[in-house]
Image (cartoon, rainbow, N blue to C red):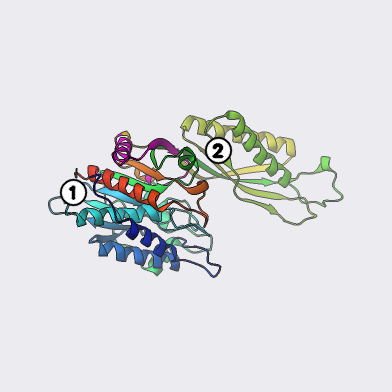
Amino acid sequence: MSELSIDAGRLLGRLHELGRIGRDAQGRLVRIAATDADKAGRDLLVAWMTGAGLDLAVDRIGNVFGIWTPQGAGGADPVMLGSHIDTVVNAGIYDGCYGVLAGIEVVETLRGAGLVPARPLVVAAFTNEEGARYAPDMMGSLVHAGGLDLGEALASVGTDGSVLGEELARIGYAGDREPGFLKPSAYVELHIEQGPVLEREGFPIGAVETLQGISWQRVTIEGTANHAGTTPMSMRRDAGHAAARVVTFLRDHVTASHAQSVATVGSLRLEPDVINVIPSRATFTVDLRDPDEGRLRDLEAALARHLEELAAQEGVRVSVERLVRFEPVVFDGAIVALVEEAAGRRGLRSRRMTSGAGHDAQMMARICSSAMIFVPSRDGISHNPREHTEPDELAAGANVLLDVASRLAGIG
């Protein structure tokens, strides 16, 4: 199989063509889930899938599947490859899209060589992976894996007040298949790293063996609004100051632990948001991650204790809403080993690693053997128009995916 290679020019051309869809007036890539831009991207993807000889299926949450069922393979559980094509605001062109388009490339390469797998091959594009419009993120794969009720997901209200189910119907991607109708034997997701490790250490391939657990919370601190000039510091119930204490606590606590934990306050709003008024309310998000479930729980507990102490010390009221909680994932060791072997046969150095970001593979691991393949991200940048991976690195990752998929599907 190592002598067979994907068509790098075709893959790169498609990445750039899809990357032109969803540009706003400022030239930013904004292909948010279930928007008109998402429809245009999906339409192009479907054209490529059908052009590759794949049978199209769309489920009720809008997940798009291109299915190749060779003669004699209809009774076997499929091997699924994929990711997503929705983006964040002002995105790069590789995140998610690379894995989906590389999956199509694998099918086209095998068919072009006259190779027939013993199992069906499926290329999946999952709905609302980014969560930029509807929560939670990785929604399509989570529904597919049975981790989120379909009705609840379709009723999700977006940041713009829209309802996901209505928007999927409007753009023509409210499918008729029930989520989970495909039961893969294995799922493999090729993705850019979105971090600096591979580039920094000089590895072209990452064999992803674990994925961090994720805990998202929304914290609200209520104090008292008052005049910024006439209220003594000792008499304030300042929600803004209390929020700042939480931010610094998280940074100091995680840094001192010397563990793999990370903590981020990515959204913070103060009310009444006036320069000369002490904030009466602070609302902010906390994103906690760790590849070890025990450490993640300890970090959550430390935050809870700090918030309790803070309320007493600052004279404020604190409430917490849990938004998302996903346990860490350990990927299938046999597939991880296949990734390493495939890289080695092609003369590519690889390292085992942990994914710091959430991915559809995280959800698919609930129902089938799963793993991921990473390629380097320049300067570790993603969710940004500066997102970049060199063409030869993109081709190398797709060739490793080709080899791994072939082995899993009974070729070679």
Disc 2 crowd rating (10 Å Cα; few below 14, some 14-19, many 20+) is many
Is residue 337 in the magenta section? Answer: yes
> Which residue is at a point 13% across and 54% down the rendered structure image?
71
> Which residue is at a point 37% across and 43% down the rendered structure image?
373
Q: Is residue 195 left or right of residue 244?
A: left
Residue 341's x, y, as percent? 29, 37
Residue 319's x, y, as percent? 62, 43
Q: Is residue 18 visible?
A: yes
Residue 387 is labelled as none
Quadrant (top left, top right, bottom left, bottom right) of the N terminus: top left
Q: Identify the magenta region.
A: 334-361
Residue 353's x, y, as percent? 42, 36
Q: Is residue 166 above or below residue 222?
A: below
- Which residue occupies the foreground of this view, 57 or 279? 57
Q: How many marks?
A: 2
Residue 224's x, y, as percent? 75, 48
Pointer 1 residue: 117
Is residue 317 in the magenta section? Answer: no
- Which residue occupies the foreground of this view, 389 or 19? 389
The mark nearer the N terminus, 1 or 2, is 1
Which amino acid, by three-letter code, is at mark 1? Pro
- Which residue occupies the foreground of this view, 98 or 244? 98
Disc 1 crowd rating (10 Å Cα; few below 14, some 14-19, many 20+) is many
Pointer 2 residue: 262
For label 2, the SS is strand
- Which residue occupies the foreground of this view, 2 or 371? 2
